[in-house]
Image (cartoon, helix red, strand yellow):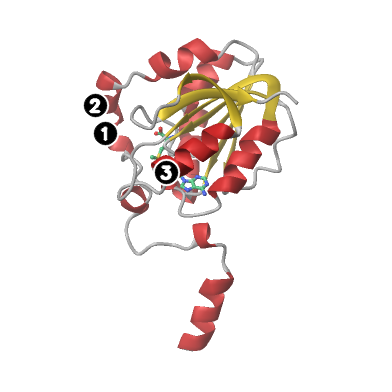
Amino acid sequence: MSKEKQKDRVEKQPKDQIKSKWPDWLFLRRPPAFLDPIRRLFEPPHRLIGPYVKKGQVVADLGCGSGYYTLPLTELVGSEGKVYAVDLGKKCIQALENKAEKRSFHNVEAHASSASDVSFIKDRSVDFVLANGLLCSMADHRQSAVNEIKRILKSTGQAYISLGAGPPFGFVDRAEWEQILEEFRVKQGGSYKEKWAVVSVKQD
Ligand SMILES: C[S@@+](CC[C@H](N)C(=O)[O-])C[C@H]1O[C@@H](n2cnc3c(N)ncnc32)[C@H](O)[C@@H]1O
């Protein structure tokens, strides 16, 4: 293919789907799955999600990686509940599907897709959204992802949103973080120093 044609093809792709020459886990700041046992020692998954998730609920893990939080979420909601797992990385979605199958978890619906368009999830159908380290890893379309979180959350639902890091290691600076939180009702956390917040949709 000519260089001109190649350039044209790349420009027509949504920016957040352009493949990097670097390994996914480095470019997308995803901790590699082989470090999960060490991560569990200082970031036990149930400690973060346990207070927000109940049996039978519908939850969405946006930017789920290879499922560090997804599988504990499926345990918490149980067979009556459902977990949508969404990540741009096809390989990590595949790894997640394999893990779920091995453990006979049938309540996970995994999508290799951008969090900026989760139209396969119905409006106001989700009790809990986890967006752990998602927005800071999104090169663009972050506002669309925020809109999607607002669209899918039930009026009684809540979302845990966090930034792994600010610039230069992440894409969200203080002004954008504050702007994002303006769109929700902040229930816990919220300072830029903390870089996490539990939010719900603002009622009209
Ligand atoms: C810092 S990792 C967090 C992974 C996981 N939430 C965790 O806590 O282990 C950020 C994840 O966001 C994903 N990501 C980046 N841009 C995305 C997008 N536009 N849509 C969905 N996922 C995206 C990356 O592939 C990566 O797995």
Amino acid type shown at disc 1: Leu
The first of marks 2 and 3 along the sequence is: 2
Within 10 angstroms of label 3, few (less than 14), some, or many (20 or more) residues?
many
- Compared with 83, 180 (above or below) is below
- Measured in 3D between alpha carbons, the distance from the residue under mark 2 to the one under mark 3, in whole angstroms, is 23 Å
- Measured in 3D between alpha carbons, the distance from the residue under mark 3 to the one under mark 1, in whole angstroms, is 21 Å
Name the residue that disc number 2 marks: 38
The image quadrant that residue 42 belongs to is: top left
Name the residue that disc number 3 marks: 136
Q: Is residue 48 visible?
A: yes
Question: Which residue is depicted at the point 34% across and 18% down?
Answer: 44
Name the residue that disc number 1 marks: 35
Question: Which residue is depicted at the point 73% across and 28% down?
Answer: 124
Disc 2 residue: CB within 8 Å of ligand 1 = no
Q: Are marks 2 and 3 in contact (CB under 8 Å)?
A: no
The first of marks 3 and 1 along the sequence is: 1
Amino acid type shown at disc 2: Ile
Q: Nearer the viewer, residue 70 or 153?
A: 153
120 vs 106, left or right, is right
Q: Are marks 1 and 2 in contact (CB under 8 Å)?
A: yes
Q: Nearer the viewer, residue 146 or 36?
A: 146
SS at badge 2: helix
Disc 3 residue: CB within 8 Å of ligand 1 = yes
Q: Nearer the viewer, residue 136 or 114?
A: 136
Image coords of residue 161 (percent x, y):
48, 30
SS at badge 1: helix
